[in-house]
Image (spheres, rainbow, N blue to C red):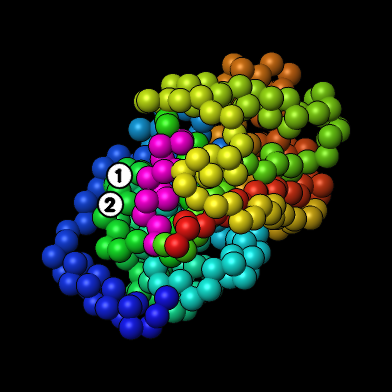
Amino acid sequence: MAKEQREQREQQGDQARRGRHEHHGQHGQHGQHGQHGQHSHHGSHGHDGDRKHHGHHTDLDWAEMAPLLESQAELFTPLYQQVMAWLAQRVTDPGLIADTGSGPGVVSCLFAETFPGARVVAVDGSAPLLERARARAARLGHADRFSTVAGRLPGALAELEYPADLLWAANSLHHLGDQRAALTAFAERLAPGGTLALLEGGLPARFLPRDIGIGRPGLQARMDAVEADLFTRMREELPGSVAETEDWPALLTAAGLKPTGTRSFLLDLPAPASGPARDYVAATLARLREGLAEAIDPEDRATLDRLLDPGDEASVHRRNDVFVLKAYTVYTAVRPA
């Protein structure tokens, strides 16, 4: 886009901000896992910190969870940096980047760092998390081109001061009942030639070998199967839920966009895990132990209890075979000019 057009848009945005008060609604999304109306799975997600639970989360205290979400998103920074490098090859000189389901703003600030000429807007349903995002942006020197919008997706995108050149939606779409309609709404908030980058799916995280010496081998695979069923139930119980085949390029096409690429990115933190990686594994397994409850058998619950007991030599706090291996898949599509 021409420099003059961008400067004019930024001037209009400054004027609009002076007259607009930030509002907020329910945390709808994640992630993002925040966006999200979001929730976090992968143990949890959104994109800041995998912050979703596959189920209802209206009682979550986002202000209390914020430090954990932030630390988890920071752990995933090597993966997100790979994503940023890939997007930078496909999106040149964006004027406005919208991070939908931003959570506490770790990824939002990575966008600001990767694209130093862009304005970045963090969009989330949680006011406390957006407060953390603004503080993070200020701490990193991005405050002059960083703003936030609080509200539920996709309606909150109407608060964008002008269409986005890059709209990032990480693990937030699947928290919206009608994903097809939401993608259409996302597309409508893109500038002509703008890019939607959708992070959905990938591979379940792995933290431990198949046989860990306690309990029955294959613990994580069994928990994945239970989580998959709960995810299906979560989707079915969302307001206005519409069943969709998860053919993301086809859905992006149906939204009026032209798919331009798909790529998966790997977080590989080998054993023995660092302190932050162990903390992430322990927090994730604790959420699973609580969230899956009676859906897993007594032997597996007992194994999880041992893995989570810091006093047990077999716990993830002490064993040397703990690692983090996780893949995310990103789909890109462009709004025709």
Q: Classify mark 2: residues with Cα within 10 Å, few (<14), some (14-19) or many (20+).
A: some
Q: Is residue 323 left or right of residue 130?
A: right
Query: Which quadrant is home to the C terminus?
Result: bottom left
The kind of secondary structure element at disc 2 is helix
Residue 260 in the image, given as x and y percentages of width and height: 61, 56
Q: Please, which residue is most extreme toward the bottom here?
A: 4
Residue 108 at least partly seen? no
Residue 139 in the image, given as x and y percentages of width and height: 40, 74
Query: Which quadrant is home to the N terminus?
Result: bottom left
Q: Is residue 278 magenta?
A: no
Q: Are marks 2 and 1 in contact (CB under 8 Å)?
A: yes
Q: Is residue 188 magenta?
A: yes
Residue occupying the point 62% across, 61% down: 83
Q: Is residue 300 left or right of residue 3?
A: right
Question: Gap in Å between the C-alphas at discs 2 and 1?
Answer: 6 Å
Residue 272 in the image, given as x and y percentages of width and height: 79, 54
Tell me the kind of residue under disc 2: Ala
Q: Please, which residue is most extreme toward the left here?
A: 19
Residue occupying the point 53% across, 45% down: 252
* Residue 279 against residue 251 in the figure, above or below: below
The kind of secondary structure element at disc 1 is helix
Camera-side residue: 320 or 157? 157
Q: Classify mark 1: residues with Cα within 10 Å, few (<14), some (14-19) or many (20+).
A: few
Camera-side residue: 313 or 1? 1
Tell me the kind of residue under disc 1: Gly
Magenta stretch: give its range.
179-191
Residue 177 at least partly seen? yes
* Residue 232 against residue 47 in the figure, above or below: above
Residue under label 1: 155
How many numbered circles does the render carry? 2
Residue occupying the point 28% across, 73% down: 9
Residue under label 2: 158
